[in-house]
Amino acid sequence: MSRTLWTDDAGIVRTIDQTVLPFERRELTLRTLDDCIRAIRDMQVRGAPLIGAVGAWGLALALAADASDASLRRAFERLAAARPTAVNLRWALERVRARVADAGPARRAALARAEAGRICDEDVACNVRIGELGAGLLHELAGRGAQRTGTGRAGSGPAVLNLLTHCNAGRIATVDHGTALAPVYRLHATGVPVHVWVDETRPRNQGAALTAWELAERGVAHTVIADNAGGLLMMQGRVDAVIVGCDRVAANGDVANKVGTYLKALAARDNGVPFYVACPVSTIDAGAPDGGSIPIEERAARELTHLSGALDDGSRVSVRIVPEGSAVANPAFDITPARLVTALLTERGVFEASVAGVRAALTEGAP
């Protein structure tokens, strides 16, 4: 099963527990509303598109247990509160709620289940299209500048496209294929030499743990780097483009993504490196006028005070790295201003990060 979220032969919803990757691949069974809330809240599933899909299934499972108006309202509110920044969650919940609102209780569970399935299928198709469009956009960069090896240094071999990404916007952040990594997989599959600089992405290390795991699984050349190394690599001419995913795009083109994204965008602008944001149209929040109106989730201090990993014998441990008593702030996201974004890469095309560009993305090719 290549999908990150699927139903088995018995119709039970299953996903991958991302909190134990890359050391173990463990399947997670989602049987109830509480299972879905826990998976979203505890980041067993993460990535805006996948969170939205799991939220849709959570509403369907809640209605299977109790299809009353009160149950629908409670389940919607509880799921929406599980992660506040990623707009796909509320978008998916609103789709399911609208689908069942006028139906009688006897039909609601089946309608919700079908809608959740459609959201998953649409996500896969959306990401395939992002991969196609992004591959074309990025391939144009491959032949520019000096010949570079997979580590970005001058060499005599074929030109390698060197990309830098932050956090994880690959297939396990979506139902399949990914957003920012979808073009990478497309280029790799068509034989284009591509190498990815992978930010470790503190806290939680989604780059070192998840993106590196994904790329290794697909055989894509990559190098894990400290979060603060990207600026130097850009200054040295070893990055052709930065491509990231996002959790929400405001109406003016400002982008909310994993904390640290803003710093990469600043370094990219200073060094003339294109900075692309791969975002399904579902991540655009027309009701948020700018980045300042996007809620920033503050997560638990332990994510900063402790590091989790595996010892050489394979046993997993968590160790404290911050002195007892030190104050800790842990904002999970930051805002990258639209002026620093070269383009928004969506399933409907490539658009300018601006009021006009966002409006065009929402209307062009819309059903």
Image (cartoon, helix red, strand yellow):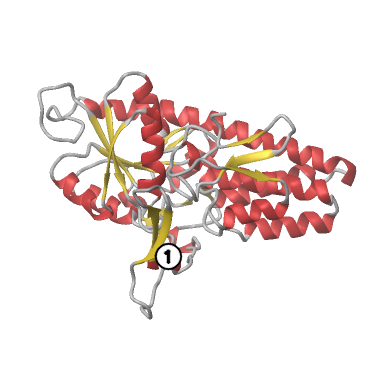
Percent position of residue 347, x then y: 49, 32
* Residue lying at 40% horizontally and 49% vertically, measured from the top left: 206
Residue 181: percent from left, percent from top: 40, 35
**Given the current orientation, which residue lies at the most extreme bottom position?**
325
Which residue is tagged 1? 331
User: Residue reaching furthest top?
Assistant: 190
What residue lies at 20% left-to-right and 44% top-to-bottom?
272
How far across and how far down the image is residue 315, in percent? 42, 51
Circle 1 packing at 10 Å, graded few (<14), some (14-19), many (20+), is some
User: Can residue 243 be spotted in the picture?
Assistant: yes
Q: Position of residue 160 (x, y in %)?
A: 22, 27
**Which is more toward the observer, 189 or 244?**
189
Kindly tell me whether residue 344 is visible in this rendering. no
On screen, residue 110 above or below 143: below
Task: Locate the C terminus and report the quarter of the image it occupies.
Answer: top right
* Rendered view: 293 above or below 261: below
- Residue 45 as seen in the image, left or right of residue 218: right
Q: Secondary structure at mark 1?
A: loop
Q: Nearer the viewer, residue 269 or 121?
A: 121
Type of the residue with mark 1? Pro
**197 to the left or right of 362:** left
What residue is rendered at 39% in x and 39% in y? 213
In this picture, residue 228 sits left or right of residue 350 = left
